[in-house]
Amino acid sequence: MTSQRFTTDPPRRHRLSRLLAPVAVLGFTGALALAAFSSGPAPAAAVTLTARPGGAVVQVTEQDAGTPVTVPTGDTVQLVLHSTYWTPPRSSDPAHLRPLGAPGTAPSAGTGCHPGTGCGTVTADFLALTPGTCRLTTTRTSCGEALACIPEAANLTVTIVVAPTR
C-alpha cells in the first residue's frame, strides 16, 4: 500500500525566496552585462511563480519518485532537481498538469561544488488543472564529470495525482 500526501501548506523543503534569489541575481547581472555591451535596451530580469489565488505551491524533488504525490486542482507543483544535468521535466498529460513557463537553472555556489559536477538545481513549475494522474519525467546522461549514469540514475519519474479541490 502506498501512502499519498495531500497538502495546501506552503513549500515543505525550501523557502521559495532562497531558491529564486540566485536566479534573480544572475538574471540582473546578465542584464547589466548585456546593457554594457549592447546598443539596445537591456532585457528585463523577472522571475515569477504563479499559483491560483489561494492555491499552494507543493514542492517535490527526486526523493518523491516512487510515491504518488496528491495535490488539489489549482495548486502549483514545483519540481526541484538537485543537479543541472537533468533535462527539462515534462508532464505526461498537460491536460492535468500544465507547465508554467520554461524551467529555470540555478548554479550552486559553495565550497563543495567543483566544476563539472552539475552543482545546482533545475526547477520547473506545473499548474494542476483537472483531476487525474500524470507523471513528471526527466533524464540525464551524466552523473558527474565524465561519469555516465547507470540506468537507474539516468531516468526520474514523479507521479502526481491531481485531486478535485475541496
Image (tube, rainbow, N blue to C red):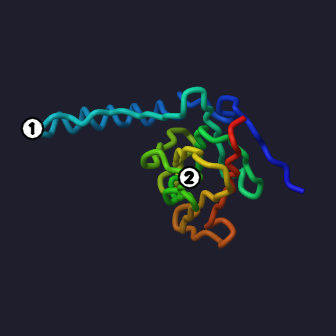
Q: Tag 1 or tag 2, which sits nearer the N-term? A: 1
Determine the residue positioned at 76% across, 40% down: 6
At label 2, the amino acid type is Ser
Left or right: where 12 falls relative to 87: right
Q: Which residue is mark 1?
A: 39
At label 1, the amino acid type is Ser
- Badge 2 crowding class, 10 Å Cα cut-off, few under 14, some 14 to 19, many 20 or more, is many
Q: Residue furthest left?
A: 39
Secondary structure at badge 2 equals loop
Judge by depth and name the residue closer to the eye, 54 or 120. Answer: 54
Residue 81, percent from left and from top: 59, 50
Q: Which residue is mark 2?
A: 83
Q: CA distance from mark 2 to mark 1?
A: 36 Å
Residue 88, percent from left and from top: 49, 57
Determine the residue positioned at 78% across, 43% down: 5
Q: Is residue 120 visible?
A: no
Report the quarter where the C terminus lies: top right
Residue 10, percent from left and from top: 66, 29
Whether residue 98 is situated above or below residue 16 in the rendered picture:
below
Residue 98, percent from left and from top: 52, 50
